[in-house]
Amino acid sequence: MLERMSTITEISEAIERLDVKEQLELLRILPQHLKISPEDLAWSRLAEPAFDFWDNPEDAIYDRL
């Protein structure tokens, strides 16, 4: 498990080093690599606005958890 976390950390750090254009391209192709269907990705994006009510100052303390 520790080795896996190291790999995830390395991947995260590599993504942070990409410029914005490269990050957008990665975002476009990432679902293919993660074996996420386009339909599943679309449904999750459609659902995001349903959680906007949690984006408020009173709940901001939980954003760091």
Image: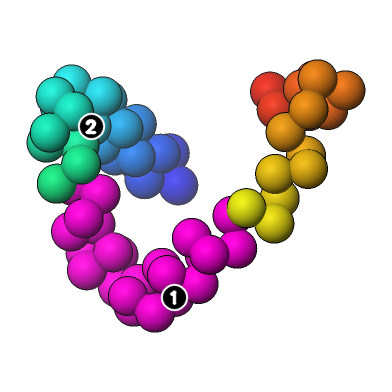
How many marks do you count on the picture? Answer: 2
Q: Can residue 65 be seen at all in this image of the molecule?
A: no
Residue drawn where x is 42% and y is 70% of the image:
42
Looking at the rendering, in which quadrant would you find the C terminus?
Answer: top right
Instruction: Give the mark, 2 or 1, whose residue is nearer the N terminus.
Output: 2
- Marks 2 and 1, Cα distance to the nearest angstrom? 23 Å
As drawn, the residue found furthest toward the right would be 58
Q: For mark 1, what is the residue? A: 40
Residue 59: percent from the left, percent from the top? Answer: 83, 28
Is residue 43 a member of the stretch shown in magenta? yes
Front-lying residue, 1 or 12:
12
Crowd tier of the residue under label 2, counting other residues whose Cα lies within 10 Å: few below 14, some 14–19, many 20 or above: some
- Left or right: where does residue 65 sit relative to residue 13? right
Q: Can residue 16 be seen at all in this image of the molecule?
A: yes
Bounds of the magenta span? 26-48
Amino acid type at circle 1 is Asp
Residue 25: percent from the left, percent from the top? Answer: 14, 46
Residue 48: percent from the left, percent from the top? Answer: 59, 55
State whether the magenta stretch is mostly helix, strand or loop. helix
Is residue 52 a member of the stretch shown in magenta? no
- Left or right: where does residue 15 sit relative to residue 18? right
Residue drawn where x is 78% and y is 39% of the image:
54
Residue drawn where x is 21% and y is 55% of the image:
28
Q: For mark 2, what is the residue? A: 15
Residue drawn where x is 78% and y is 27% of the image:
56
| 2 or 1: mark nearer the eye | 1
